[in-house]
Image: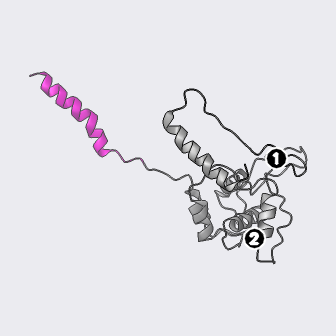
Amino acid sequence: MANKPLVILLFISIFLPLCFSTPLLHVSPFAFLNKLQGCTKGDNVKGISNLKNFFHHYGYLNHQINATSHLIDINVDDTFDDRLESAIKTYQQYFHLNSTGSLNVETISQLAKPRCGNPDIIDETADRMLLEHNSDSRHDYHHLPHIVSHFTFFSGMRRWPSTKYHLTYAFLPGTRVDVKAPVARAFATWARYTHF
C-alpha cells in the first residue's frame, strides 16, 4: 500500500511538467524570406546574406573573388546589390515569373517551395535557357557572370559510338526479387523512347 502513493507521486512528477510546457515550434528554414518581401536594390536587410547563399548554392550567384588575395570571398553581406538583383532576375526567368529583380510575392512563394538540393544552373545552361525562352528583348542575358561551374563536359561534340547502341544491365547477387520487375519495366519504357 505504501508503494501506491509513491507511484502516484512519480506519475505526477513526470507528467505535470508536460502539461504546462510550451509546444515545440517548427520553424521553417525559409522563414527569413518573409522579412525580405518587397526588398529592392539598395536595401540592407538582415537575411539577405541567407538569400545570397541560397542563390549561390543553386547556381544563380557566384561569390566574388577578392581582388587582393584572389580567393573567393564567402563573407556575404545583407546588402541588396546589382549581383543579387541579376540573380533574382535569372531565378524569376528560370521559373517563368515576371522578371522584376525584386522580391515580390510570387518570387518569395517560389523560393519557399520544397525542392531538391541540386543546382538549377551549371555552366552555360542558364545562358542558353534564357536566350531561348526570353521573349522580353529589353534584358540582355547573353553574359551571366554569376553562373556557377561545378564540372565540365568533354571538349567537342562527342557522341556514343554507333556500333554500341545495345546496352545491357544486370543485378548484383542479393538484389531483392521485387525490385527486378519494376526496373526492367523502366528500362523497357526508356528503350521505347531512345535509340539504345
Which residue occupies the foreground of this view, 35 or 143? Answer: 143
Q: Quadrant of residue 87?
A: bottom right
**Circle 1 SS class:** loop
| Amino acid, disc 2 | His
x, y percent for residue 112: 57, 59
Of residues 130 and 73, which is closer to you in this image?
A: 130
Query: Mark 2 sits on what residue?
Result: 133
Mark 2 or mark 1: name the one nearer the start of the chain. 2
Residue beneath the point at 52% across and 38% down: 179
- Residue 196 in picture, x, y percent from top left: 72, 48
Q: Nearer the viewer, residue 24 or 44?
A: 24
- Residue farthest to the top, as pictured: 2
Q: Main secondary structure of the magenta part?
A: helix
Q: Tell which tag, 2 or 1, sits nearer the viewer.
A: 1
Q: Secondary structure at mark 2?
A: helix
Q: Position of residue 49 (x, y in %)?
A: 69, 54
Q: What residue is pinned by disc 1?
A: 160
Q: Which residue is depicted at the point 65% across and 68% down?
A: 103
- Residue 7 lies in the magenta stretch: yes
Look at label 1 and name its amino acid: Trp
Confirm whether the magenta stretch covers residue 17. yes
Q: Which residues are magenta?
A: 1-24
Can the viewer see residue 148?
Answer: yes
Task: Please state which of residues 167 and 17 is positioned toward the viewer in this rendering.
Answer: 167
